Amino acid sequence: MRRATNPVASAAQQLDEICTLAAPDLDQQTLAHIRDLIDVTAERSEVDPSWCVIGMLGGTGAGKSSLVNVLSGGEVVTAGVRRPTTNEACAVLPRGREPQELLGWLDIGRRVEAPQALPGDTVVVDLPDIDSVDARHADIADRLASRVDALVVVVNPQKYADARLHDEWLVRLRSSHASVTVVLTHIDTISLPERDAIGQDLHRLLSDRGMADAEVFAVSATTGEGMRTLIKHLTREAERVSRQASRARAALREASRILRESLELTGTVRGLETDGLAAELAGTAADLAGAPIIAAAVADSTLRAGRRAGGWLPLRWLARTGVDPLRRLHLDDESRAEGATTPTLPTRSASDEAAFVNAVRGAIGERAQARPARWRAALVERALCGAREVPDAAHREVAEHIRVSTGAPVLCRALGGAQLLAWLGVVVGVAWIVLVHLGRAVLIDVRVPALGPIPLPTALVVLCLLITVLCACASRALARWAASRRRRVVMRDLRGLCRDAVDRLVVAPLRSEDNRQVTIASFLARLPV
């Protein structure tokens, strides 16, 4: 494609960039068709843009050559089945003027001068018959029909309803041309009622194929009937096409339309809200990495350590039975001291991984409801490609970076120390009572201080026992609080590790695909055509 030097060429360049972005969404045939339209548009906008090329399209015997001769004011082409232009296009030029670059771009070798002036800077091209027995003729007609600025479709009363003409040619060419004119020839061979009937039927056929606005003229090259009106119309169309570069703009609009229809774009496309997506999916990913099991093990280990450090002394031995939950996962201090650097994380099942994939699919599907089905599927597929790697990545992140607090809280140890002092008081009180009773047994009068009616040794024993129970209860409550807090911290940290994995593998590719789609939609929305 040439460097853009005008608005049309610049728009073509933009559309070409869009096609590059949209290539994954388009089939090869559609993409090739769009690029052909873009290339033709860009090239035509640079090649003699002030000239207008009028192409005469029709089948054998439609009257194209006769019509060209009347427009040219002389016998410039030979009519008939075996005329010289049957196998090649013929360009009719204004006398003394020849747009070499334009004719070279059209690749038309046969050129003749018109005896009379053509409308404006106009080249009239007599195209090969589209129904020729030689397929090469149709190929030439097809190539040139896509490049001419204004298209004149010539039909006769016998073949005006030809299905191939309407369904294979007009339907394909109508939108890529700013000017399409239908000419019914040989009207001198039919009656007035027949003309009216054929005219109405022709309008109906055109309307059914989206060409209700196409101009229809009934002419006779033999008698000259209707020719003056047709020439005036073509003169106006030539001036309009040349002045506004409407052919190029029409081709761009057609390319843009095909692209929009292929992508199923019907309105504006807003970017997806992905800010909270990683955090939303991190919980499920953390579950895959065993976060709840690890958090529960940390909490249970904290409770065990709290009972060992500050539990009621006669029952502390119970806290030393069994295996520490963190020991099983190689996350305790003892395992670290032994050199175990890789924790033993819980295994995950296929159903767990499927649950995460479904969570990703549901979250993205909900956010992308307004997108065309093709784009919505592309977003989901792009995210799922990374989502399938998240379980292993989350497992690695947790194994490499997990840090957990172990052991009893400091206050539990302090309460355990206070409890030991209280038990020492119990021992002192019991020993005091025993000594008093032994003294009295040998008839030694021992005076025992009292707190009111209660002897001091007894009060000491009761008070210290009460203190041990209170210290044990306080230590238990503190251990539960610490276990709950550590559980939350572990879950938060593990979700953070998993959030990084989800953001890298799911959200980042999703944002890339989302940006691609939004860029395409925004370009198409503001395309200056």
Image (tube, rainbow, N blue to C red):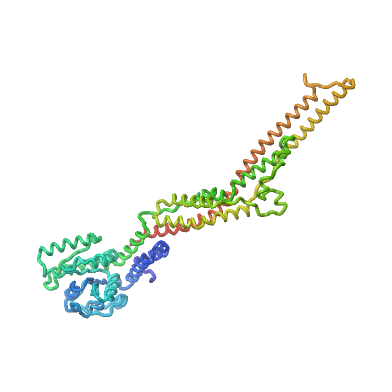
Task: Farthest residue to the top: give it.
Answer: 453
Q: Where does residue 14 sit, x and y in percent of width and height?
A: 39, 64
Question: The N terminus is located in which quarter?
Answer: bottom left
Quarter residue 181 falls in: bottom left
Task: Please give the name of the residue rendered at 20% of the width and 64% of the height, measured from the top-left corner.
Answer: 215
Q: Residue at x 68, y 41 (%)?
A: 304
Q: Is residue 270 left or right of residue 106?
A: right
Compared with residue 441, is residue 64 higher up or lower down, i.e. above or below? below
Q: Position of residue 121 (x, y in %)?
A: 24, 73
Instruction: Give the camera-side residue of 21 and 519.
Output: 21
Viewport quadrant of the C terminus: bottom left
In the foreground, 448 or 242? 448
Q: Nearer the viewer, residue 43 or 175?
A: 175
Residue 395 pos. (x, y %): 59, 54
Q: Is residue 141 left or right of residue 156?
A: right
Kindly tell me whether residue 253 is visible in this rendering.
yes
Name the one closer to the observer, 207 or 294.
294
Q: Residue at x 42, y 58 (%)?
A: 517
Left or right: 83, with 381 as reference point: left
Q: Is residue 244 visible?
A: no
In percent of the image, x 70 and y 34: which residue is there?
A: 472
Q: Position of residue 504 (x, y in %)?
A: 54, 56
